[in-house]
Amino acid sequence: MPEWKLHWLEAEGDLELWRPQIAAEIEAAHATVSRSVVPPRLDILVERIPGKVIPEIGIAGHIYRRSLFALTLDPDNPNFASSLRDGNLRRHVVHEVHHCLRKGGPGYGNSLGEALVSEGLAGQFVTRLFGTPPEPWERAVESPVALSFFPAADMMASTAYDHRAWFFGAGEQFPRWLGYTLGYMIVGRWLETVPDVDGAALVSVAATDVLSAWSNKK
């Protein structure tokens, strides 16, 4: 795994007990990505921060730039151990790797529409590579409810949108994880129009192309 270098940040708690399994899961993620695209050169910060994770899995990810992302873990979370066993950790790594790849190409984007597409692409990338169902945040809202919140064109183009509200439910204006669910749906529609799309296209497609497929939906 020469392209990926792990950096263990343990000032807030060590990960010694879990290091071998964490490293093995990240290596498995690298092998999976390698079957679809050329893995990017990455520095990966592996850190332990109690409570700063998705409660349902004990893990969280955050991309800083195209060559750097953080994988935050909380071994005290009751769901962390199962995430090491059931593939949650490796899938989460691949999701963040997709963000890094896209950051090095067309970019994550600044508008709500671009963010929806980037998150949806990362989710569908994981689904295709692993053959797994959507993650909980990608099916968090029933389709009729999600569609009732579907943003109008002017909101799609807005760069002043509230990311935490749309994607995490902050402020209770929108259901939790609405943005991830909508993004997964939008990209799913685009994939129906390009059934032979490869991994590289899932990284480099323009957000406008994906959104156009939804706009032309019959």
Image: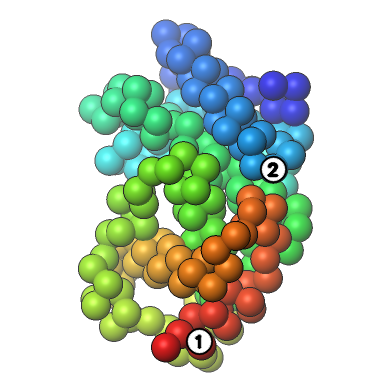
Q: State which quadrant residue 81 falls in.
A: top left
Q: Secondary structure at mark 2?
A: loop
Residue 114 appears in view = no
Can you say whether 74 is above or below 96 in the image? above
- Identify which amino acid the numbered label 2 is placed on: Val
Q: Residues within 10 Å of mark 2 (few under 14, many from 20)?
A: some
Rounded to the nearest angstrom, the CA distance separating label 1 from label 2 is 29 Å
The image quarter in which residue 177 lies? bottom left
Q: Are marks 1 and 2 in contact (CB under 8 Å)?
A: no
Callout 1 environment at 10 Å: few (<14), some (14 to 19), or many (20+)? few
Which residue extends farthest front? 196
Relative to 120, is 202 on the left or the right? right
To which residue does mark 1 refer?
215
Q: Residue at x 23, y 68 (%)?
A: 142
Q: Quadrant of the N terminus?
A: top right
**Residue 172: numbered disc:** none
- Say which residue appears at 34% left-offset and 28% top-offset: 86
Q: Which residue is mark 2?
A: 37
Reply above or below: 147 against 218. above
Give the colouring mode of the picture: rainbow
Residue 83 appears in the picture as rendered: yes
Q: Give the residue drawn at x 43%, y 43%.
A: 131
- Point out residue 88 in the picture as x, y percentages from the top left corner: 39, 34
Q: Is residue 57 left or right of residue 63?
A: left
Q: In which quadrant is the C terminus drawn?
A: bottom left
**Picture coordinates of residue 124, whole percent (x, y):** 49, 55
